[in-house]
Amino acid sequence: GESVGLHLPTLSVQEGDNSIINCAYSNSASDYFIWYKQESGKGPQFIIDIRSNMDKRQGQRVTVLLNKTVKHLSLQIAATQPGDSAVYFCAENRVETGANNLFFGTGTRLTVIP
Amino acid sequence: NAGVMQNPRHLVRRRGQEARLRCSPMKGHSHVYWYRQLPEEGLKFMVYLQKENIIDESGMPKERFSAEFPKEGPSILRIQQVVRGDSAAYFCASSSGTGQQQLTFGSGTRLTVV
């Protein structure tokens, strides 16, 4: 289901620590997932993606893990920096819709403490 | 590459007026998506268009809302007879084709209905 009118989950980390942001998805038919970062007043910005035939993918300072058994996605940010402070959304591509539209989770607000 | 361009950035309308939101996709992109975001919430899919065609409008209210992507010019999201509940950020995204791929988002239009 969708969360309406609820405050975003928040995560506060110390600068330099690693951050882990979690996301649960509901549709077992989804086969493509993306993490987006949204800074205040801006549009979502692509971070990293993963297809369902993979369980891990690494980028620069970021790693996405996919557990299809429990329908769980996580984003790991290494050595978190103040510039990482933002809201992070996971998005899933639901194959059965027949279109390339993405469905977004509620989001997690990450605050990095200098 | 200017990216996805949306205008205006901010739009204020009185109840009952019409709101027109414009989106120019990235150069080379022929697929446009509109999303709506309420404060502290995720993005909700509204409509997916290709040039001169609406592919999926399952997320768009049946009344007062319409979208187009003409052969020439930007995509337009039109809201007639706006109400206070239409106040939100409206984001446009584009992609180069079908299939699983990331969407590139614009900076959004923040609509305020007074």
Image (cartoon, coloured by chain):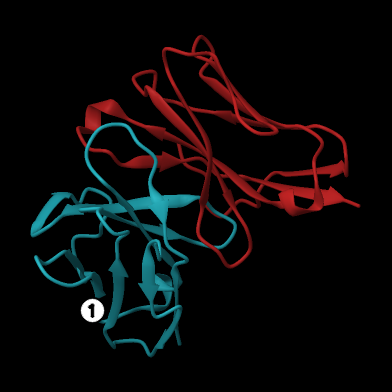
Chain colours: A red, B cyan
Relative to B43, A59 lies left or right: right
Residue under the image location 26 percent in, 82 percent down: B81
Q: Quadrant of residue A13?
A: top right
Residue farthest to the front?
B1
B51 vs B76, nearest the viewer: B51
Q: Amino acid at mark 1?
A: Gln
Residue under the image location 39 percent in, 62 percent down: B1
Relative to B85, A42 lies left or right: right
How many numbered callouts?
1
Relative to B50, A87 lies left or right: right
Q: Position of residue A85 (x, y in %)?
A: 73, 52
Q: Position of residue A97 (x, y in %)?
A: 23, 33
Residue under the image location 48 percent in, 13 percent down: A54
Relative to B86, B69 lies left or right: left
**B54 relative to A100, above or below:** below
Q: Secondary structure at mark 1?
A: loop
**B20 relative to A90, above or below:** below
Q: Position of residue B11 (x, y in %)?
A: 42, 83
B1 vs B39, nearest the viewer: B1
**A76 relative to A52, above or below:** below
B113 vs A101, nearest the viewer: A101
Subunit that carries the residue with mark 1: B
**B57 relative to B1, above or below:** above
Q: Position of residue A9 (x, y in %)?
A: 69, 44
| Residue at numbered disc 1 | B80
Q: Quadrant of residue A53?
A: top left
B43 vs B16, nearest the viewer: B43
Q: Quadrant of residue B32?
A: bottom left
Q: Residues within 10 Å of mark 1 (few under 14, many from 20)?
A: some
Residue under the image location 35 percent in, 87 percent down: B15
The quarter of the image holding the N terminus of chain A is: top left
